[in-house]
Image (cartoon, grey):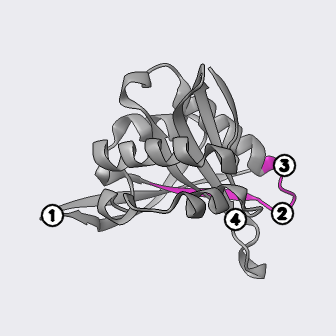
Amino acid sequence: MNSRRLTATDAKDYLKLRLEGLQHNPEAFGSSFEEEKDSPIELIASRLKSQSSYTIGVFDQEELVGVATLVQESMLKLKHKAGIYAVYVSPEKRGLGIGKQLMLEVIGKAKELEEVEQLNLTVVSTNASAKRLYSSLGFEVFGTEKKALKIDQQYFDEDYMVLFL
Protein backbone atom coordinates (compact mmCIF):
# COMPACT_ATOMS: atom_id res chain seq x y z
CA MET A 1 0.00 0.00 0.00
CA ASN A 2 1.40 3.37 -0.97
CA SER A 3 0.10 6.82 -0.19
CA ARG A 4 0.40 10.33 -1.55
CA ARG A 5 -1.34 13.66 -1.72
CA LEU A 6 -4.17 13.52 -4.22
CA THR A 7 -4.18 15.88 -7.19
CA ALA A 8 -6.80 17.04 -9.67
CA THR A 9 -6.06 13.98 -11.82
CA ASP A 10 -7.37 11.80 -8.96
CA ALA A 11 -10.79 13.48 -8.95
CA LYS A 12 -12.71 10.56 -10.52
CA ASP A 13 -11.20 7.99 -8.17
CA TYR A 14 -11.76 10.28 -5.19
CA LEU A 15 -15.41 10.88 -6.07
CA LYS A 16 -16.01 7.15 -6.55
CA LEU A 17 -14.55 6.39 -3.10
CA ARG A 18 -16.38 9.35 -1.51
CA LEU A 19 -19.73 8.18 -2.87
CA GLU A 20 -18.98 4.65 -1.64
CA GLY A 21 -18.37 6.06 1.84
CA LEU A 22 -21.53 8.15 1.79
CA GLN A 23 -23.51 5.03 0.89
CA HIS A 24 -21.81 2.51 3.21
CA ASN A 25 -21.32 4.78 6.24
CA PRO A 26 -23.74 7.72 5.92
CA GLU A 27 -23.48 8.40 9.66
CA ALA A 28 -19.77 9.16 9.32
CA PHE A 29 -20.21 12.28 7.17
CA GLY A 30 -22.06 15.57 7.41
CA SER A 31 -22.84 15.41 3.70
CA SER A 32 -25.05 12.84 1.99
CA PHE A 33 -24.91 10.66 -1.10
CA GLU A 34 -27.92 12.53 -2.51
CA GLU A 35 -26.12 15.87 -2.14
CA GLU A 36 -22.88 14.71 -3.75
CA LYS A 37 -23.82 12.09 -6.35
CA ASP A 38 -24.07 14.64 -9.15
CA SER A 39 -20.98 16.67 -8.19
CA PRO A 40 -19.16 17.87 -11.30
CA ILE A 41 -15.74 16.26 -11.59
CA GLU A 42 -14.31 19.77 -12.15
CA LEU A 43 -15.49 20.79 -8.67
CA ILE A 44 -13.77 17.79 -7.09
CA ALA A 45 -10.61 18.48 -9.10
CA SER A 46 -10.53 22.11 -7.97
CA ARG A 47 -10.87 21.05 -4.32
CA LEU A 48 -7.98 18.62 -4.71
CA LYS A 49 -5.87 21.43 -6.23
CA SER A 50 -6.55 23.77 -3.31
CA GLN A 51 -3.50 25.07 -1.47
CA SER A 52 -5.41 25.30 1.81
CA SER A 53 -6.30 21.61 2.09
CA TYR A 54 -4.41 18.35 1.76
CA THR A 55 -6.17 15.14 0.82
CA ILE A 56 -4.05 12.04 1.33
CA GLY A 57 -4.96 8.84 -0.46
CA VAL A 58 -3.83 5.28 0.09
CA PHE A 59 -3.63 3.04 -2.95
CA ASP A 60 -3.69 -0.74 -3.19
CA GLN A 61 -1.75 -1.00 -6.44
CA GLU A 62 -3.70 1.48 -8.61
CA GLU A 63 -6.95 1.44 -6.61
CA LEU A 64 -7.73 4.28 -4.18
CA VAL A 65 -8.87 2.55 -0.97
CA GLY A 66 -8.59 5.22 1.73
CA VAL A 67 -8.59 8.99 2.14
CA ALA A 68 -8.28 11.72 4.77
CA THR A 69 -8.32 15.50 4.37
CA LEU A 70 -6.46 18.13 6.41
CA VAL A 71 -7.68 21.73 6.31
CA GLN A 72 -5.91 24.57 8.09
CA GLU A 73 -8.13 27.36 9.36
CA SER A 74 -7.64 30.56 7.37
CA MET A 75 -8.79 33.28 9.77
CA LEU A 76 -6.00 35.04 11.64
CA LYS A 77 -7.19 34.06 15.13
CA LEU A 78 -7.79 30.44 14.10
CA LYS A 79 -4.69 29.67 12.01
CA HIS A 80 -3.20 27.70 14.89
CA LYS A 81 -5.84 25.02 14.25
CA ALA A 82 -6.49 22.51 11.49
CA GLY A 83 -9.28 20.01 11.03
CA ILE A 84 -9.27 16.45 9.81
CA TYR A 85 -12.23 15.54 7.62
CA ALA A 86 -13.64 12.85 5.38
CA VAL A 87 -11.57 9.96 6.76
CA TYR A 88 -12.69 6.79 5.00
CA VAL A 89 -11.32 3.35 4.21
CA SER A 90 -13.15 0.87 1.95
CA PRO A 91 -14.81 -1.84 4.06
CA GLU A 92 -12.87 -4.69 2.40
CA LYS A 93 -9.57 -2.97 3.28
CA ARG A 94 -10.31 -2.22 6.93
CA GLY A 95 -8.19 -3.85 9.60
CA LEU A 96 -5.00 -3.55 7.53
CA GLY A 97 -3.67 -0.39 9.17
CA ILE A 98 -4.74 1.96 6.37
CA GLY A 99 -6.63 4.27 8.73
CA LYS A 100 -3.58 4.57 10.95
CA GLN A 101 -1.35 5.19 7.93
CA LEU A 102 -3.67 7.98 6.76
CA MET A 103 -3.85 9.59 10.18
CA LEU A 104 -0.08 9.46 10.69
CA GLU A 105 0.45 11.13 7.31
CA VAL A 106 -2.12 13.83 8.02
CA ILE A 107 -0.62 14.50 11.46
CA GLY A 108 2.84 14.64 9.86
CA LYS A 109 1.61 17.15 7.28
CA ALA A 110 0.04 19.27 10.04
CA LYS A 111 3.37 19.34 11.87
CA GLU A 112 4.99 20.70 8.69
CA LEU A 113 2.58 23.64 8.66
CA GLU A 114 4.34 26.33 10.65
CA GLU A 115 1.35 27.83 12.42
CA VAL A 116 -0.66 24.69 13.26
CA GLU A 117 -0.63 23.80 16.96
CA GLN A 118 -3.70 21.62 17.27
CA LEU A 119 -5.79 19.22 15.22
CA ASN A 120 -9.53 18.81 15.62
CA LEU A 121 -11.89 16.16 14.34
CA THR A 122 -15.35 14.80 15.00
CA VAL A 123 -16.35 11.17 15.12
CA VAL A 124 -19.71 9.49 15.61
CA SER A 125 -19.84 8.54 19.29
CA THR A 126 -20.70 4.90 18.52
CA ASN A 127 -17.76 4.40 16.12
CA ALA A 128 -15.60 2.54 18.61
CA SER A 129 -12.88 1.46 16.14
CA ALA A 130 -12.28 5.00 14.85
CA LYS A 131 -12.29 6.42 18.39
CA ARG A 132 -9.77 3.75 19.46
CA LEU A 133 -7.51 4.68 16.54
CA TYR A 134 -7.71 8.41 17.23
CA SER A 135 -7.12 7.91 20.96
CA SER A 136 -4.09 5.69 20.24
CA LEU A 137 -2.60 8.61 18.32
CA GLY A 138 -3.09 11.03 21.20
CA PHE A 139 -6.46 12.58 20.39
CA GLU A 140 -8.69 13.29 23.39
CA VAL A 141 -12.45 13.83 23.54
CA PHE A 142 -13.31 17.34 24.72
CA GLY A 143 -17.04 17.36 24.11
CA THR A 144 -20.03 15.58 22.66
CA GLU A 145 -22.71 17.06 20.47
CA LYS A 146 -26.01 15.27 21.04
CA LYS A 147 -28.08 14.59 17.93
CA ALA A 148 -25.33 16.05 15.72
CA LEU A 149 -26.57 14.17 12.65
CA LYS A 150 -30.03 13.05 11.62
CA ILE A 151 -30.51 10.38 8.98
CA ASP A 152 -34.18 9.72 8.31
CA GLN A 153 -35.53 9.54 11.84
CA GLN A 154 -32.33 8.34 13.54
CA TYR A 155 -29.97 10.65 15.41
CA PHE A 156 -26.22 10.25 15.89
CA ASP A 157 -24.09 11.96 18.54
CA GLU A 158 -20.60 13.15 17.64
CA ASP A 159 -17.53 13.38 19.85
CA TYR A 160 -15.17 16.30 19.35
CA MET A 161 -11.53 15.28 19.64
CA VAL A 162 -8.31 17.31 19.76
CA LEU A 163 -4.61 16.58 19.43
CA PHE A 164 -2.18 19.26 20.61
CA LEU A 165 0.98 19.11 18.51
Q: Earlier in the sequence, mark 4 or mark 2?
A: 4
Determine the secondary structure under disc 2.
Answer: loop
C-alpha distance separating marks 3 and 4: 13 Å
Residue at the far right: name it. 114
C-alpha distance separating marks 2 and 1: 40 Å
What label does residue 152 carry, if any? Answer: 1
Stretch of the chain drawn in magenta: 111-122
Placement of the N terminus among the 4 image quadrants: top right
Q: Which residue is mark 2?
A: 115
Residue type pointed to by label 2:
Glu
The reply to whether the magenta stretch includes residue 119 is yes
Q: Which residue is mark 4?
A: 81
- At 31% across and 45% down in the image, what residue appears? 25
Q: Earlier in the sequence, mark 3 or mark 4?
A: 4
What label does residue 138 carry, if any? Answer: none
**How many residues crowd mark 2 within 10 Å: few (<14), some (14–19), many (20+)?**
some
- At 73% across and 80% down in the image, what residue appears? 75
Of the two numbered discs 2 and 1 in the rendering, the one whose residue sits closer to the viewer: 1
C-alpha distance separating marks 4 and 2: 8 Å
Q: Is residue 52 above or below residue 70?
A: below
Of the two numbered discs 1 and 3 in the rendering, the one whose residue sits closer to the viewer: 1
